[in-house]
Image: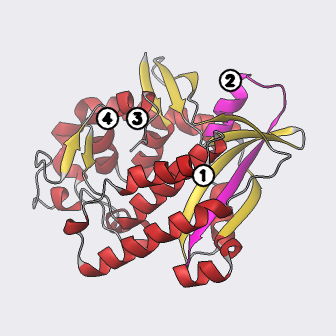
Amino acid sequence: MDKINVSRIQDSFKCEVYAHNRWRLGAQPVFEGVPMRIGSAWHAAMESLMKGGSLDMAHQAAANVLSTVDESMLPEKKLDEFIEQSELVRFLIPHVSFPPEWEILQVETELQMNLEALDGTIITLRGRPDAVIRWNGKLWHVQHKTTNKSVSWPFYEQAIARSFHEAAYTAMLEASKLYSEPVAGTVLLGMRKLSLASAKKDPQSCFHRAFIPVMDRARALQTIVRRGSYILKEDVVFEADMPLQLLQNRDSCLGSFKNMPCAFLEVCNGQRKLEDPAYFKHVDPYAVYAEGEETP
């Protein structure tokens, strides 16, 4: 039985080299940039609060993530950004609240379901939703997101409504039969990274909440079967075909919002080696995932 998870499938759509390096070879960048670390710190704090932790515990969870950043490695502009956004995270944590009518059922709990690949192989699909809540007689998958100040919430809502990632989690939750209620979709809990001065004037302007129905689950499962079958086959022959895989989509190489290059771009261009410990660490991504830590 082969294992695969939602993040690996989603990464393969963005770039096969990226997905292969992270999920087949277990290569993880030592540092992935300020936006990723700030987002991870916020996510850790929200996980702590949704599990019933105190404000002190949430602050500590965020601090644990932020402490992994070597500030001496950041250029001055990025260092200033990191310091201000770290302070923003610390300032906003006490202003977070969840509606009392929400029943939080699980937080960062792994879901699994078995699917038959095109060659008959059984694929175990794994995923770890940020949280699952019961509200208004239905189940909702919670998605924590941080955005920069230029990204609109309607943009995010439209993207999530068509997101394979969200649909896959919804399908797994339905298949688990853990609860009797229907699965309605995703709750977007967003935090916009405004300036600290703006946040202090109006903390709630940084937050956004939206209930979003997600695309057809059946299509998501079909995508999983097709893509999962391809990935499992591609893993076997990828190294031999690597020279043919190096020309990638420009948008993938430029990264999210075109302001953070892909961590493997210099590897693809022959300027850096995956074996360089100053830039990459090597782990079993599925072992890390199973322990409930942050996934690649």
Q: Is residue 177 magenta?
A: yes
Residue type of the residue flagged with mark 3 = Tyr
Mark in front: 2 vs 1:
1
Residue type of the residue flagged with mark 4 = Glu
Residue type of the residue flagged with mark 1 = Leu
Residue in the image at 65% along x and 44% along y? 50
Q: Which quarter shows the N terminus? A: top left
Residue in the image at 17% along x and 54% along y? 279
Residue in the image at 67% along x and 57% along y? 189
Q: Is residue 218 magenta?
A: no
Q: Give the residues drawn in magenta, as a range.
A: 169-195
Residue at numbered disc 3: 230
Q: x%, y% of residue 51?
A: 63, 39
Spatial CA distance of label 2 from label 1 is 32 Å
Residue at numbered disc 4: 234
- Secondary structure category for the residue under label 1: helix
